[in-house]
Image (tube, coloured by chain):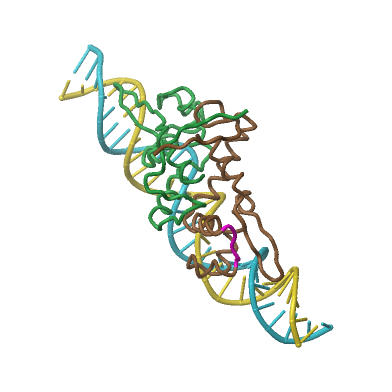
Chain colours: A green, B brown, C yellow, D cyan
Amino acid sequence: MFRMIARMENPHSEQLTSSMLSEAAGEELAGVLKALAHPVRLKLVNIIGTAGEGCACDFPAAVGKTQATVSHHLKQLVEAGILQREQRGKWAWFQVDQDRLAEICSMIC
Amino acid sequence: MFRMIARMENPHSEQLTSSMLSEAAGEELAGVLKALAHPVRLKLVNIIGTAGEGCACDFPAAVGKTQATVSHHLKQLVEAGILQREQRGKWAWFQVDQDRLAEICSMIC
DNA sequence: CCGTCATTTCGATCGTCATCAATACGATAA
DNA sequence: TTATCGTATTGATGACGATCGAAATGACGG
């Protein structure tokens, strides 16, 4: 029912409800959350995170969008630091940056 | 440097990177994150959360937006379940729903 | 070097969002 | 009830985001 989690402290000590959030930190956090706040992008993160990694070639069918649209969403996730991209031959593979997600959580809670 | 956190499990056991996220849960999470993913709304949550509570009358000056714009943002936060509204005489007071924030975190990490 | 295949970028369109002034609503005090 | 003050809603406008088809880029294999 409960579990214990060890987590690194937020290096900037900025936290949404217990310490003042700087202008810059607010903008940064808003940007990352915006990248995450879309059903298709959440689904991509979910697929990749659950499987450990994922090939871009499989995503259009998985999320029901064109390849161009998927590429657009992947770019946003990479730019937000949530996904990491790796080229393997012709194919682009993606992984979730778990530390980045943990960092986001540590700023919210 | 590290700290231990006891946390309630996500009642739906849906978690972004370790279990399949349902269509509905994805839409729901995207909606809440969208409500949070704006600099002005983050600042409102930060102000209210840090102080414990806050009066709507103080926010326009605090965030540098008109009363109408602030009211619009507050509504979104309330509808997302992040803020709770309470009428005290003429004034509207707001509090952060910490459990709701924890719930969001538990779905991300 | 070509040709092919995977992926990204471009350009256009359409819908949604942020913002504010003006107005309406709601609560209190006179 | 009426006046007043705080807050919410409306309506309009400009900015931004999602989407896709088409064209460009990049990575192989021959």
Towards the viewer: A25 or A12:
A12
Q: Is residue A56 above or below residue B46?
A: above
Does residue B39 appear left or right of residue B84 in this picture?
left
Residue B102 vs residue B32, the one in the foreground? B102
Q: Position of residue A26 (x, y in %)?
A: 43, 54
Residue B9 % position (x, y) = 60, 31
Q: Quadrant of the N terminus of chain B?
A: top left
Q: Quadrant of residue B86?
A: bottom right
At horizontal 46% and vertical 49% (from top left) the residue drawn is A15
> Is C1 rendered above or below residue B67?
above
| Relative horizontal placement of residue B106, taking residue A29 as reference (left or right) | right
Residue D22 % position (x, y): 37, 37
User: What is the total number of numbered labels drawn onto the structure image?
Assistant: 0
Residue A53 x %, y %: 41, 24
Q: Nearer the viewer, residue B54 or A45?
A: B54
Any magenta on residue B76?
no
Q: Residue at x 29, y 21 (%)?
A: A89
State which quadrant residue B10 falls in: top right
B53 is within the stretch colored magenta? yes
Residues in magenta, as a range: B52-56
